[in-house]
Amino acid sequence: MSAVLEKAPPAERADEQRRSWAAVLALALFEARKLLLRLPVLLMFVLYAAWIGWTMRDAWSSYPALQDVDRATQTGPLLPALAVLLCANQAVLRSQRQDTDRHFDVLALEPWRRTVGFALSVVPAAVLTALLVAAQFTWAVLAPGSVGHGSVGELLVGPLTVLLAGTAGVLLARVVKSPFAAPMLMVLAFFSILFLGAVPGDSNGSATRWLVPVIGDASSKTLPSDLLGRPAVWHALYLFGLALTLALAAVLVNGGRTKTVAAALVVAVGLGTWGAVGQAAKVSKATTDARVLATLNPAKVQSCARHGNSTYCAFPEWVPRTGTWAEVTDHVQSLAGGTAAQEKLLVRQRVEARYGMDADGAIEPSTVPYQVTVGTRWGGPRVPEFAAAVSSVLVMGSEKATGSLCDGRMVTIMWLALGWQSDPLTQMRAVRLDDSVSGSAIVLSPTNPMSMTTQQTDVVRELLTAGPNKVAPAVKAHWAELTAPKVTTAKVAQLLGVKAPAGADKCE
Amino acid sequence: MTTTVSAAGLSLRYGSTHALDDVSLRLGEGVTGLLGPNGAGKTTLLRVLATALPADSGTFTVLDHDPGTTGGRQEVRRVLGYLPQTPGFHPDFTAFEFVDYVAILKELTDREARHREVRRVLAEVDLSDVRGKRIKKLSGGMRQRVALAAALVGDPGFLVLDEPTVGLDPEQRMRFRELIARAGEGRTVLLSTHQTEDVAMLCNRVVVMAGGTVRFDGTPAELTARAAGRVWSGTERDPAAMAGWRTGLGAFRNVGDPPPGAELVEPTLEDGYLIALDGMAAEVAA
């Protein structure tokens, strides 16, 4: 062919460049529309949206902590991510599979620019995921009693996972021209995730576990957001860098060997590496110290609010919830007799934060008289658990003393905790470990659990069935006897006017 | 004739086979027919001119653009409409989507203008009514017209059509001829075909290829004239004839060097084609 070099004038060249990039954008929009309308993608987005709807329903009654909600948005997007990986891969292979290559190869838009278009076509799927994540999170923010702070880094993981999957699908199609490669990649990714998660690490968890897109926690507890120590922003940067690297590698493989692409690839690899190194760092000393302080000396970092006779001290993010705790305390105290009805309690929020989210740790019962522990979670069984903690302190004087409880006072404690509730038997079921209302059981509380014997359970159930109007006057009238050490369950039943169980108290 | 496409000395080998051997030609506006038997090098020539395949040697220009450079090749592709032999389709695309997709790859970027253009070419090939139908639901003839619409979108100055009427029934072929004739108005069309009727009815110019070389380049009338005095009628097939066959009227039509006293008949384009192929005629006639 002729070696004559035709060079268009700069203005013309710039115009051609603009035209080519506009075509890339048009291709990206076309492919994005096709991708979002593919059955697997549609189906997975519908499933994902349904899952969000399900979690939204719960969020309205579960007093969400936003630093947990943000992480909870990360697993759902794996559904559309898998579909996007498969379908983006198939879209790139479409021309080869359906034999339009011979025709399309001579069309003006260069192959590497088409790859840019394919890579960009997965962005709307990521944006849609981001919208769904935002909806899920916003719903939790608007839920009554929500507390805490979400992290943008955590919220970005879902959309970035979809972006990463899409670009992986594009790169794979450019490297391996087989439709079976994407399913194989998914199987490989699954086992890689298992392997990476299994590689032993230090006390902060596996050394490599942050290399996979979505990282779960060993613990389900809720911590103040500043104590989490999750490298969320680093991880988001890592995912973004990785997605960009895959996309640019696909462009490079497909002939886009321009200086701009090469430079962008270097930047992308740099971003990914920067994120990977950042996320692999150990939890900072400041966070570790803050965790120790929050666990052992929470008063130093808490704010206190007074409601009625009692004081409520909480980590800053939970201060708005102290009023809700006070309502429970007031209800319990309103059923108590003697000085307990007016007792000035100190309700203190406590956490075991020393292990971060890597492990659970029980909170030791407080030895301080009339101090009640409240946890970081609320709603559902946490309400009767807290009520049981309040009533136990009113009856026993301290949480520590409750640990040795093995007599009829357990009946009074449980009645105070549950007697004011609108559906006390349901709450009784909720606060017992075995979800039953008969037989012996462990009763949950924010610190050490208590135990109920079968006889105590029977008496409590009868008292709850009788209703507060009938029982409350008797409790107030016999308060001193009901709370006397070693009072038997039979005696308590007799004082409160229900059938006394046979046999002596026998703790298990 | 104003030359719009010119090629000089194009050669291409597949191993020891000369697919193209020093091919030179000049094309102008209108439809040029490219005739030749299987393996003549027609598709190879079209693929080279469509920039799908680089030639080993030789040069060509399309509307003053030289594909020898990256920029030049892009320019050629911007003015090119290409309908490959047995074109592929995306069966799940609608006719509109498929042509729109091709339009995007042709860098027609303004969405509104592009869609207007897609509607125009679909109307031109008489597919407006089915533009929303998926391609897998269209008949073979309709699909072929979708492919032609895809080649026509963007109003290319040079249209390369590789055996577009293969597999079409006579009615579809007639309709296609109409479309190609219209497409040839104001642009250069290179039409590869086995059908001499296509050439006779459509082309103002014809190139005959065989064995990778150009055997004839001229007007259809000139090709027909080549057979003047070399076609005769007889009661039996003349063994000395290049080709001979029984006609519908029962007489034998012989092409070649007539024996003395033979009853000469009026030649057709097909006769001229056979003469142009010369030694390959028997194979073609078989």
Image (tube, coloured by chain):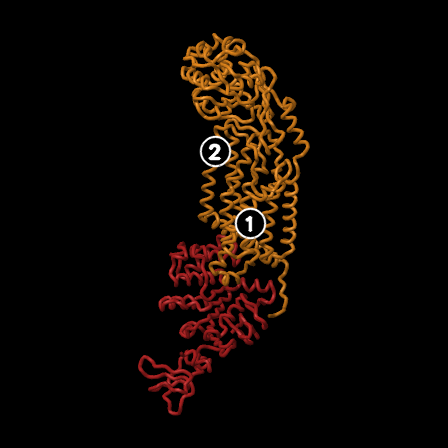
Chain colours: A orange, B red
Q: Position of residue A348 (x, y in %)?
A: 59, 21
Q: How many labels were placed on the picture?
A: 2
Q: Is residue B35 above or below residue A499?
A: below
Residue found 43% across the figure and 57% down from its top? B91
Residue found 41% across the figure and 61% down from its top? B143
For residue A252, the mark is none
Q: Which of marks 1 and 2 is nearer the N terminus?
A: 2
Is the residue under label 2 in contact with that under label 1 (CB below 8 Å)? Answer: no
Q: Position of residue B220 (x, y in %)?
A: 44, 77
- Crowdedness of circle 1 by 10 Å Cα count: few (<14), some, many (20+)? many
Question: Could one spot residue B7 in this view of the protein?
Answer: no
**Residue type (three-letter) at the residue carrying disc 1:** Thr
Q: Is residue A130 above or below residue A488?
A: below
* Chain where mark 1 sits: A
- Secondary structure beneath dot 1 equals helix
The residue singled out by tag 1 in the image is: A167
**Quarter where residue A294 is shown:** top right
* Chain where mark 2 sits: A
Question: Could one spot residue B169 in this view of the protein?
Answer: yes
The residue singled out by tag 2 in the image is: A56
**Residue type (three-letter) at the residue carrying disc 2:** Met
Q: Which of B80 and A461 is in front in this view?
A: A461
